[in-house]
Amino acid sequence: MAVAPASDQAAERSPLRLNPVSIAVVILGVALVSWLITVERMRGMDAGPGTDLGGLGWFLGIWVTMMAAMMLPSVAPMVLAFARVTNQRASKGQATFVPTWVFVAGYLGAWTAYGLAAYGIFRLVDAIDGGLLAWDRTGPYVAGGAIVAAGLYQLTPIKDVCLRHCRTPLHFLFHEWHEGRVGAIRMGAEHGVYCVGCCWGLMVVLFSLGVMSLFWMAAIAGVIFAEKVFPYGMRLTKVLAVAFVALGIWIAASPDSVPGLTKPGSAPAMQRMTP
């Protein structure tokens, strides 16, 4: 009777080698826990557009948690495809089994880099002109202009390429496969870069509306999921482009009338920030 190689036997016994259903449950479970942590840490912190991001360490912690909550549901098809391919390759003795979390770590690493860049830009703008984002000066125009720019980005070829990549996981895995844990981290990071290319404009919208707003965070997460997972996701980009351009103009022209938008410095905003 043939004996399976020791590496295959170890992979079969590995507690990290989960079936697709278990992986899906873990992904959604981590996303749910991340949402609960985010709600607990960010409740009452929405001070509207231009909300101070706090210290770098605190911001990175909440940012990674936010990305896990917002992005894991929409990246689940890619993660499940990676798990299926690595399981099949390990079962056939073509490669060493790699836990799925390694791929996810590379993916979240790309979004962490985006968060660091956003934090750096915020601090740079604040250092150059601390009043630029002030709501009683040019704040509404800056926020509105950023949202209009994000809407126009929805119509660009780069957005189209990145979104198509995110919607076709098997094409990426078959053409960009790299072996081992380092390869898995690399693939996760590469997919993360495409995801950033697809969604950075949507995150700009979130920053412009209030990055600490649970309402806008949930709304943007829903938009990302719809674009990447729903059958009509590619066509949705044009609808969102029009919506964002209209929203940006609305905020620039009459910010006080926008539903769900917290006006910085207003009584409700100050009340939320009071312990």
Image: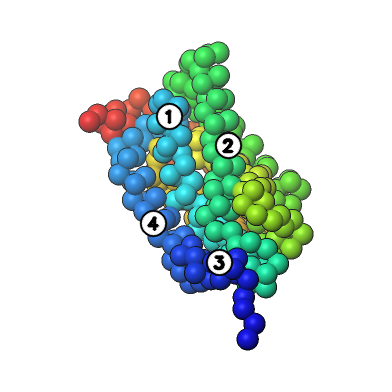
Residue 198 on image: x %, y %: 65, 48
What residue would you read off at disc 3? 11
Circle 2 packing at 10 Å, graded few (<14), some (14-19), many (20+), is some
**Labels 4 & 1 near each other (Cβ < 8 A):** no
At horizontal 60% and vertical 65% (from top left) the residue drawn is 7
- Measured in 3D between alpha carbons, the distance from the residue under mark 3 to the one under mark 4, in whole angstroms, is 29 Å
Circle 1 packing at 10 Å, graded few (<14), some (14-19), many (20+), is few
At horizontal 63% and vertical 64% (from top left) the residue drawn is 86
Residue 76 on image: x %, y %: 54, 61
Quarter of the picture holding the C terminus: top left
- Measured in 3D between alpha carbons, the distance from the residue under mark 2 to the one under mark 4, in whole angstroms, is 22 Å
Quarter of the picture holding the N terminus: bottom right
Inspect this view and state whether residue 121 appears.
yes
What residue would you read off at disc 1? 57
- Measured in 3D between alpha carbons, the distance from the residue under mark 3 to the one under mark 1, in whole angstroms, is 37 Å
> Is 207 rendered above or below residue 2?
above
- The scheme the figure's colours follow is rainbow
Using the image as rendered, state which of residue 162 and residue 14 is in the foreground.
14
